[in-house]
Image: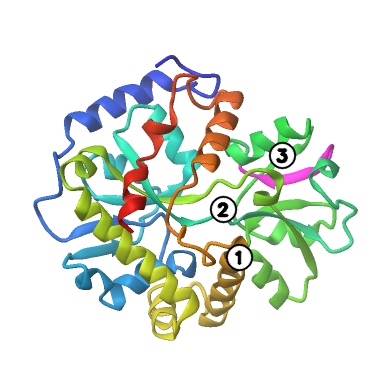
Amino acid sequence: MLPTKFGHFYYISLLLNLLILVGCREGPRSDAPLVLQTNWAPQPEDGGFFHASESGLFEEEGIDVEVRPASAGMNIYSHVAAGEADFGISVLAKLSVAINRGLPLVAVASYRPATLRVLLLHEDDPVQDFPDLNHRMVKARGEDLWLKYLQHEYKLEMRIVPHDFGLGQFLAQDDLIQQGLLTSEPYTLKERGVPVRILELSKAGWENPEVIFCRRDLLEQDPELVAKVVRASLKGWDEFLRGDAEETLAWLAKENPARSIESMRWARDELTKMYGESGVWTGDDFGKISPEKVERILSILKTLGAVGDSLSVEELVDFSIGERI
């Protein structure tokens, strides 16, 4: 596959991917339990998976699964491709880029209908919608695809300030706009008495659903095993957001003392509202990956030059698991 304009390190990445593929295990890991690798420390944003683990939902499916928090700097895609874990979670766009680079991964289910990414604005900021961001100062990770999408889609010229995952500069500058998560920074700012507004990236045409993925060989050799992991995970999300999640929240707060249980309860409530407003619980589509969303994300990524023109929907997603859940 030819390098794209975002592939400055393409050949290095290709070499690393080849080394990963050489070391890949075939099929399920022989040293049970299976590992579902998250992409952050224990947090309510991944709460459904931890709820499934803590509530014995994987055992109900007859499988042994460890839901493992990420370590600092982990590349979850290489980790799963190399067989260090069996399943991972990701926004679809980032997974697409990893697959485009040759990693033998595939999305099998959607556990969140859209990204949680938002832009934080001070309450009296004149920006009301995304086109208003032109010529504004935005604190963000300049390499992130959502930012490149906004710049392309709305013909924006923005001054990008490198993101340091802190709020100090935002608090000090009334004219600064900063990236954040729907379920995190708004709570922190509210607790500090700072009135803010948000712009949700999902409402700018960047829905970018969050998905469960695995290695292709695992799916091909044991699709029912993959379906069991997916079913238990989705049931975990349903119970975490629509049932009594207090025990899971207490466990998360114990495992991640950097966030208070109050902030985690608030995050869970925001997630519940988001899922409810998305309509995923009004039919039988929860967990199924929308072909339309995949096609849109893939089209955007090709336009941005983030993936090759030949990359297909079928290379990114296997829709058959949706028929087993």
- CB atoms of marks 3 and 2 within 8 Å: no
Crowding at mark 3 (Cα within 10 Å: few <14, some 14-19, many 20+): some
Residue at image mark 3 = 160
Does label 3 or label 2 sit earlier along the sequence? 2
Q: Position of residue 30 (x, y in %)?
A: 9, 51
Q: What SS does tag 2 mark? A: loop
Q: Is residue 196 left or right of residue 185?
A: right
Amino acid type assigned to the residue bearing label 3 in the image: Ile
Whether residue 257 is visible, yes or no, is: no
Viewer-closest of 324 and 238: 324
Residue at x 45% of width, y 61% of height: 284
Q: Which mark is residue 114?
A: 2
Q: Is residue 306 a member of the stretch shown in magenta?
A: no
Q: Quadrant of residue 303?
A: top right
In the picture, the quarter occupied by the N terminus is top left
Q: Which mark is residue 274?
A: 1
Amino acid type assigned to the residue bearing label 1 in the image: Met
Amino acid type assigned to the residue bearing label 2 in the image: Ala
Residue at x 37% of width, y 43% of height: 319
Q: What SS does tag 1 mark? A: helix
Range drawn in magenta? 134-141
- In this rendering, is residue 163 above or below 251? above
